[in-house]
Amino acid sequence: MIPTNQSWGGRFSQPTDEFVKIFGASVFFDKILAPYDIAGSIAHATMLYEVGILTDEEKSQIIKGLNTILAEIKADKFNWSIDLEDVHMNIEARLVEMIGNAGKKLHTGRSRNDQVATDIRLYLREQIDAISSEIKRLQIALLDLAETETNTILPGFTHLQAAQPVSFAHHMMAYFEMLSRDAERLVDCRKRMNSMPLGSAALAGTTYPINRSRTATLLGFENSCNNSLDGVSDRDFAIEFLSVASIIMMHLSRFSEELILWSSAQFDFIELPDSFCTGSSIMPQKKNPDVPELVRGKTGRVYGNLTSMLTIMKSQPLAYNKDNQEDKEPLFDTVDTLKACLRVFGDMVPTIRTKRDNMYNAAKKGYTTATDLADYLVKKGLAFRDAHEVVGKSVAYGIQEKKDLSELSLEELQKFNADIESDVFDILSLEGSLCARDHLGGTAPKQVIQAIKTARKALK
């Protein structure tokens, strides 16, 4: 008798090539799905009993055996075999070894195709919940930091040129808003993902009188996939998650870039603690912002996983194909990478120390209140384009004299427009500029404080 895989070898007259066996096996990485595979099998066995396919004794044997296997896996006492290809057949083989013929009946009415599709959704559903919790933790850290820095002023930038003064808290709240959208996208992704493929069998459904609604309820799915072909071959939910993950990483990367710039000697706006930095093996003065640099770098890794998944799926005819074995590693890697990046940011943000004087002095250097002067002239009756020209000439003069607009005398300012009066200095100060933007979404401290209160309420 030629040895072949017992789960499908009846059709074959030659054993699988040894290298092909290794090449085609997924147990190296899909064993992470074991708890979800067992949960799916327990629900499936319960349903099979309820529709009369299993006896009460067979169901009890199966569930007891599966729970024993889960305990073995958690205790790292389970013997994973490459000969059995994947997580599903490893668990099934062990179950048959433990309870005999009843274990062979578990696969009635299902296929590995709908089994793995279900396992991945169960896994990803749990991971989305964990990621959502990490996002919330980071948001709380941002709110705490913002609350202490409401009156801290730094230059806001466009084109990386000093533009207008903003509150550091307002700047932090921008990232809070990004993360809020990320959290909403995860909720949407989870909702679309929470449909159960189990019962689709290999591709066309099954001839057994299964009750898919009952299985879905047992597993906490909102509903069952409506089309068996789509149920086994769909990976849209994974692609959507990878897309959401890429957007989250993009936000973290933007934040990382600013932390890297701000902690440099050239900006010197913040200091990151030693515990989130490293030194140099040759330059003893160096303090490198490795954590944000790594997060920035790992963003490309997550983008690559999204591209990988899109490429895996783009040419597949219906229904399931072996290509789909390649869906797991990019998905698992993205989950681990994203959770780690969110966790380290959640740990790091509360430790950021701002250098308020340096930020304030930087905001005074770039003529950041020039727009305020233009607005002042408009309120005096000048058309904005004319006011823009007047202020441009004032700035050119300030550059020539090496003075900020707030440092020019009233007489100097009146050279450019006679309507300028002494009250102009109220709006040319950084504080005056900040407070003038007192509207929803503005950087005025009063508005930022309200935004923080609203955000805390939304998170509860």
Image (spheres, helix red, strand yellow):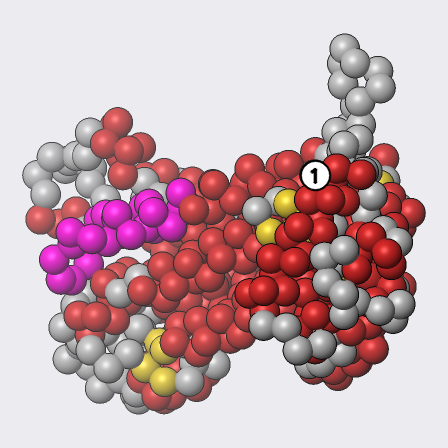
Seen in the picture, residue 372 relative to 436 is either above or below; the reply is: above
Q: Residue 202: percent from the left, percent from the top?
A: 19, 65
Given residues 75 and 24, the one toward you in this image is 24
| Numbered marks: total | 1
Q: Is residue 323 magenta?
A: yes
Can residue 383 be spotted in the picture? yes
Q: Residue at x 49, y 71 (%)?
A: 185
Residue where numbered disc 1 is placed: 260
Is 182 in the magenta?
no
Q: Amino acid at mark 1?
A: Ile
Q: Position of residue 63 (x, y in %)?
A: 48, 72
Quadrant of the snapshot with the C terminus = bottom right
| Label 1: how many Cα within 10 Å (few below 14, some 14–19, many 20+) | many
What is the chief secondary structure element of the magenta stretch?
Answer: helix
Rendering quarter of residue 130: bottom right
Is residue 157 rendered to the left or right of residue 192? right
Residue 77 seen in the current view: no
Q: Is residue 1 left or right of residue 217?
A: left
Range covered by the magenta-colored residues: 304-328
* Helix, strand or loop under label 1: helix
Q: Is residue 56 above or below residue 262?
A: below
Which residue is rendered at x = 43% and y = 46% of the image?
303
Above or below, 384 against 222 in this view is above
